[in-house]
Amino acid sequence: MCSGIVRIGRAAITGLALLTAAAQGVPARSQPRASGDVQAQPVAATLAAQAVAQEVAQAVAQAVAQAVAQAVAQAVAQWSAASGIEPKQIGLVALPLGGGPALAQHNAGAAMNPASTMKLLTSVAALAVLGPDYRWRTDAMLRGRLVDGVLDGDLVLRGGGDPKFVIEDLTEFIARMRAAGLREIRGDLLIDDAIYDVGAASVQDFDGDPSQPYNVRPFGLLMNFKAVKFAVDARRGTASIVLDPPLDGVRIDNRMSVARGPCRFAISVATVDDAAVVPGNGSAAGAGAANGKAGGAGSTSRGGKPAAGAVIRVAGSSAPSCGERSVFSAVLDHRGFIEALFRAAWVGAGGRWDGTARIERGAARGAPWQSWESPRTLADVVNDVNKFSNNVMARHLLLHLAVAAGRVPATEEGARAALSDWLARRGLVFPELVVENGAGLSRSARISAMSLARVLEDAAAGPHADLMRASLPIAGVDGTMKYRLAGERIAGNAYIKTGSLAEVRTIAGYVDAASGRRYAVVLLVNGPRAEAASQVQEQFLRWVHANG
């Protein structure tokens, strides 16, 4: 059945090419000459031949299109039969780069939820608007006098919207401040997040689990994705917990139990009290361990008492045979997280600070005292967004489209408008498009398979084609496609972004066919059986690779 589609398509291309050539004109020497109007009969014959050829070409093209559509529909039904997915719940297209009719399309114009494949649109736009070499900057200002290493006032940090300002960056930035002569802060840490205006919530109310890092919302001074690693080790008979990176002034309510026998590991993390952190307590400077007794108090640092402020409850079980197991969790709100992370890093660098962190928009005025430029380019960030499907980083990219357009503070509405403007300039008009946050973590987001394929087609013809393609997970090699199609002929030849939500499974990217031709491919599945779509996705990718 699938090979039949290819035979029909190739025959159509060959036939249409011949008919087009014929329609260009009939050689004059094949016509009889007559005295008088020597050219009249050949010209009339040529025009008649052209008209006939055009009619035949149109008829053949229409018949072939109908046959291909029918064959594709049959193939989709065959691919989806075992999964229980209805063909009407699938939208797909394989579009050859460089022009030409679609190799295959089914329900390609239907508006569907793309899940994380929406990140492709955000990434393509960010590369085009900001450029692959764009870097984010975080500034530090002094609000007060710095004398003999003591700041008699506040330290201001102005966020530049860096989507990957991680603990290593903060540690190095603090080292620069210390080298510049700052030892003690006798005021507060003021957080200026005025570059974005996305509301006060720190996590997305998407699936009811605020501990999931994918639910973290954008913030002008996002630090370490507002998440830490909880490492659990039960090999000494109790379940110890270490936070990496450490958070100062935060108490761990350790309710982990120890199981016996084969490894069984389960953990849940919840912020149960977001009260102000207490300086000098908690898991500062790498202490981070908590006793393993259910309901036991958290660890302390520098000999202080367990923190009476922010509390993070860790529950579950682990067995000694598990060794060390870990999970990344989002904790606290943005303000509390920055305070706890900064204090731990500042004290770890030999500094002193007993104040608190406050959000004060517009606090950063004048020239910066110190600045941190991200060691990562936008191309690096796009790579992380697509290889590992990082939601909050993608959301920052979308917001930065508004920043680049001068819409500051950037809002999601302004970012969507900036994206629409860019699409219009590219001649990409998608009436069905609905963008909520640019990451695909949405129930309202919509795009058709054909529209997403056209975005990929446009990107492939642009100056950042190689960067964009290289940012995608490679089948059987890395990212979210590392263990899919491994060892098969297609491995290494499919660059595919995946997407997953409840009742949504999607893939989109590029496939290098065995023929050497490259295709933009999109397959969107929306329906109650979408979680069974992996087989349909892989059959589609194999087919494009083999028959394209």
Image (spheres, rainbow, N blue to C red):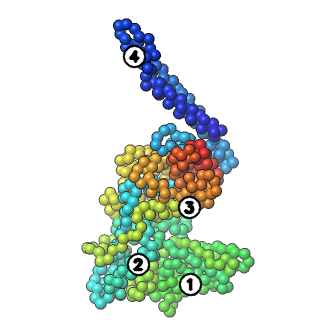
Is tag 1's residue or tag 3's residue first in the polypeptide sequence?
1
The kind of secondary structure element at disc 2 is helix
Question: What whole-number distance in Å separates the C-alpha atoms at marks 4 and 2?
Answer: 80 Å
Which residue corresponds to the image point at 35% horizontal and 87% vertical from the top-left? 183
Q: Which residue is mark 4?
A: 43
The residue that mark 1 highlights is 289
Q: Are marks 3 and 4 in contact (CB under 8 Å)?
A: no
Mark 4 neighbour class, 10 Å CA radius: few under 14, some 14 to 19, many 20 or more:
some
Answer whether residue 528 is visible to the viewer in this image: no
Please name which of the two marks, 1 or 2, marks the residue nearer to the observer: 2
* Mark 3: amino acid: Asp
Residue position marked by numbered label 2 in the rendering? 172
Please, what is the three-letter code of the amino acid marked with disc 2?
Glu
Quarter of the rendering containing residue 315: bottom right
* Distance of label 4 from label 1 (alpha carbons): 93 Å
Which labelled disc corresponds to residue 478? 3
Q: Secondary structure at mark 3?
A: loop
Which one is earlier in the sequence, the residue at label 3 or at label 4?
A: 4
The quadrant in which residue 362 appears is bottom left
